[in-house]
Image (spheres, coloured by chain):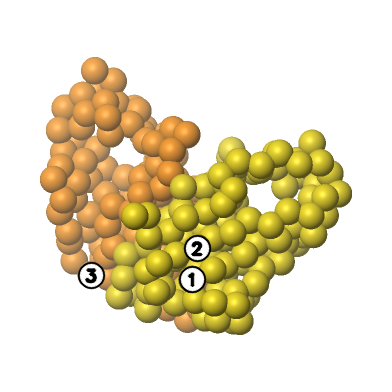
Chain colours: A orange, B yellow
Amino acid sequence: KNEVEQSPQNLTAQEGEFITINCSYSVGISALHWLQQHPGGGIVSLFMLSSGKKKHGRLIATINIQEKHSSLHITASHPRDSAVYICAVRSHNTDKLIFGTGTRLQVFP
Amino acid sequence: DAGITQSPRHKVTETGTPVTLRCHQTENHRYMYWYRQDPGHGLRLIHYSYGVKDTDKGEVSDGYSVSRSKTEDFLLTLESATSSQTSVYFCASAGHSGANVLTFGAGSRLTVL
């Protein structure tokens, strides 16, 4: 079993829909990152979370440390949000970064 | 200026030749990581470093070695490249635990013929 699990693996949506991507992990962490990668592009860090909730524009990220779960929400989705979204956790013991396999999001006009 | 740069960005080489990829960061980050990204596998950790001369293996370290002689540089070496090492390689850096954002390089595309 992977230490970081993401769901769904693939997601399609119509423009304007509310999107949720989930991440569950099984190790003790010091931080959780949400990353975005456009096709053929580099990787950009969207959020770093150690507790609670963060918001940036139409993106909201939450984390529940007790349940070892995080969600990334996109409100009013747009075709330019089409990308792979990756959850990564930083192990509290080793500082290794452990990645989920990513969620491929496609938003159609 | 980018906080983290990788070189070369593209390389084509032949089986059996040595290859070195360089990652350079100007963030004074303690932690540096090398990953490979392949279709269907996501990002897999090759090696990481938690300080100068301090490195450890990741999940796919066979066939790779690393060195970190300075805070800012983390080198990934393929002693004898194989076709299975054709991939996109990403370097990342991070500060002290939980304190800093994670920064990625733009990636290095390596093709081994």
Q: Quick one: label 1, few (<14), some, or many (20+) residues within 10 Å?
A: some
Q: Which of marks 2 and 1 is nearer the N terminus?
A: 2
Q: Could you tell me if the residues under marks 2 and 1 are in contact, i.e. CB atoms within 8 Å?
A: yes
Q: Which amino acid does label 1 sit on?
A: Glu
Q: Which amino acid does label 3 sit on?
A: Ser
Chain holding disc 3: A
Q: Residue at x 19, y 35 (%)?
A: A18
Q: Residue furthest front?
A: B1
Total numbered labels: 3
Nearest the eye: A46 or B22: B22
Residue B96 at x, y percent in the picture: 37, 78
Q: Residue at x 82, y 54 (%)?
A: B80
The residue tagged 1 is B72
Q: Label 3, secondary structure: give it.
A: loop
The residue tagged 2 is B24
Q: Which residue lies furthest to the top in this view?
A: A109
